Amino acid sequence: MTFAATITSALRTTMGAVAQDVPVNEFGVWDGHPTPWWETALLLLVTGLMALPVALMIAWLLFRLRFQNIIVTASLAAAGALAVFLMVRAYNMANIAKQDALIPDDPQFRLMLVAMFVVSLIGSMVFMTWLKKKQELALSEIDPEIFE
Amino acid sequence: MSSFLDLLTAFAFTVACSGFASIMFGGKLPKWWFWIVAVPLFSWGLALAVALFPRPFSPDFNTGRADFIALVFFGVVLPTAYLAVALSIALVRWSLKSRAAKK
């Protein structure tokens, strides 16, 4: 019991030291060192790609609703994907913020949102271009004589 | 409750992506979708659940770090490893089939 208490106490002290020395971010710290750049890059890539399917679905829906300007629709889709993510996160973040576990201005979280937006925007633009080409091809295959 | 929510999120993500792909493929998913794409999608769904619902803070445990490791495992390691194995098997199967067809 004493052994367990000592370990717990040591862990608490370590966590306290970590919190003092290194800026706490959403994804934690390792052995008191700041998160290495390659870990941040990996994280940004993964989170960006996870938002992409949602952005593609929104882009497709908007395309079907005749919003066919690539830049405007792709921006709306990327913003929509970000909004969905933030709405789901909001409740959870409020709970975490109550415990003062996160600094309010977490740069890593902001970077994650930027990565989500950029990946969703580029992905949606490529997807919209493909949809437009597909539509043009389908239209070109229609025999104009049937309208005469 | 939390793991149930994670599994539910992953399942919903997989179903939504598969449904969307089905629309893109003209109403029917190709046969290879279920055994090549569905597992990485489910894994991505789990990574999404980790990002959406981070663990509550604990003074005895570096929860942020644990979330990061889970995110990298479900978002990168597991899908990559599965795709490497599944695509290799698919390639071998395809080459065997095409060889049999030539004979």
Image (cartoon, grey):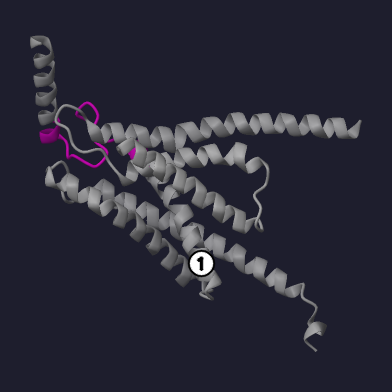
Residue A130 image offset from top left, x and y in percent: 61, 63
Which of A42/B40 is in front?
B40
Q: Does residue A42 appear anywhere in the picture?
A: no
Q: Is residue B75 above or below residue A115?
A: above
Which of A118/A60 is in front?
A60
**Residue B20 in which image quadrant:** bottom right
Q: Is residue A85 left or right of residue B15?
A: left
Q: Residue at x 71, y 70 (%)?
A: A138
- How many labels sit on residues? 1
Q: Which residues are magenta?
A: A18-42
Residue A28 image offset from top left, x and y in percent: 24, 36
Q: Is residue A96 left or right of residue B9?
A: left
Q: Is residue A146 left or right of residue B37?
A: right
Q: Is residue A132 above or below residue A51?
A: below
| Amino acid type, label 1 | Leu
Q: Residue at x 34, y 60 (%)?
A: A83
